Image (cartoon, rainbow, N blue to C red):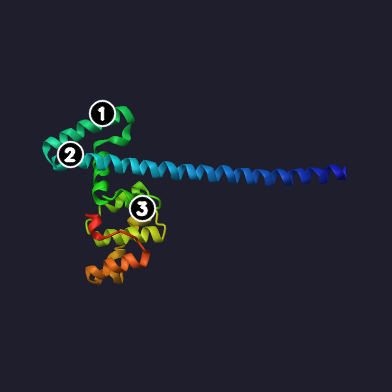
């Protein structure tokens, strides 16, 4: 009887250990799949926005261009679902305009989500946008935290905001080591 209890406990310990190991493998694989899918979804949205921007040029700002985009979004929504509404398509275009370099966008999309980009492109001031982008990356902000920091006016309250523009850019670049990123890239 005592041997059965010892054997049962040994089986439970081995089983628990195996369960934990296999669960870790599954959880890690699932997380990698999520990261992979999100990264490629973000790149797909960027490519859509970039393609439309390149193809339409400035026609997109006219009444004619708006009608073309409305028709396009209706057709895409009918075929692919609600992620391609007029608003979604225009946001893709805006993100591709603000983050015009594909390689830079791909690098940033490894740490920022599409929702981060949608929030960041609402910030008109390039230095301010770069500040929130870099702080979001450095401190792993969620989108909610990013919005909260904007509401708290973190940029305006920072010591960096009172510096001349060239010092702001230099400071943001050196502090977070963002290679090949300039304020001109944001415009």
For disc 3, the neighbor class at 10 Å (few under 14, some 14 to 19, many from 20) is some
Q: Nearer the viewer, residue 129 or 145?
A: 129
Of the two numbered discs 1 and 3 on the same chain, state the one appearing first in sequence: 1
Q: Secondary structure at mark 1?
A: helix
The quadrant in which residue 4 appears is top right
Relative to 76, 20 lies left or right: right
Of the two numbered discs 2 and 1 on the same chain, state the one appearing first in sequence: 2
Count the marks: 3
Residue that sits furthest to the left in the current view: 63
User: Residues at badges 1 and 3 in contact (C-beta under 8 Å)?
Assistant: no
Spot occupied by residue 8 in the image (x, y as percentages of width and height):
79, 43
| Residue at 24% from the left image edge and 30% from the top image edge | 74
Name above or below for residue 30 compared with residue 127.
Answer: above
Spot occupied by residue 134 in the image (x, y as percentages of width and height):
35, 60
Spot occupied by residue 41 in the image (x, y as percentages of width and height):
37, 41
**Is residue 70 among the parts visible in the rendering?**
yes
């Amino acid at each position: 009887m005592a041997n059965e209890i010892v054997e049962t406990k040994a089986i439970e310990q081995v089983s628990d250990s195996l369960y934990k190991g296999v669960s870790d493998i599954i959880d890690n694989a699932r997380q990698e799949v999520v990261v992979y899918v999100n990264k490629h979804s973000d790149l797909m949205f960027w490519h859509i926005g970039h393609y439309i921007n390149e193809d339409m040029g400035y026609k997109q700002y006219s009444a004619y261009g708006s009608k073309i985009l409305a028709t396009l979004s209706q057709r895409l929504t009918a075929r692919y679902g609600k992620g391609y509404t007029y608003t979604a398509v225009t946001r893709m275009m805006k993100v591709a305009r603000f983050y015009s370099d594909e390689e830079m966008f791909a690098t940033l999309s490894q740490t920022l989500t599409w929702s981060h980009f949608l929030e960041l492109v609402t910030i008109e001031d390039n230095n301010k946008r770069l500040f929130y982008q870099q702080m979001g990356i450095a401190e792993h902000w969620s989108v909610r935290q990013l919005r909260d920091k904007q509401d708290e006016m973190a940029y305006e309250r920072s010591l960096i905001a009172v510096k001349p523009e060239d010092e702001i850019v230099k400071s943001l670049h050196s502090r977070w080591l963002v290679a090949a990123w300039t304020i001109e890239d944001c415009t």
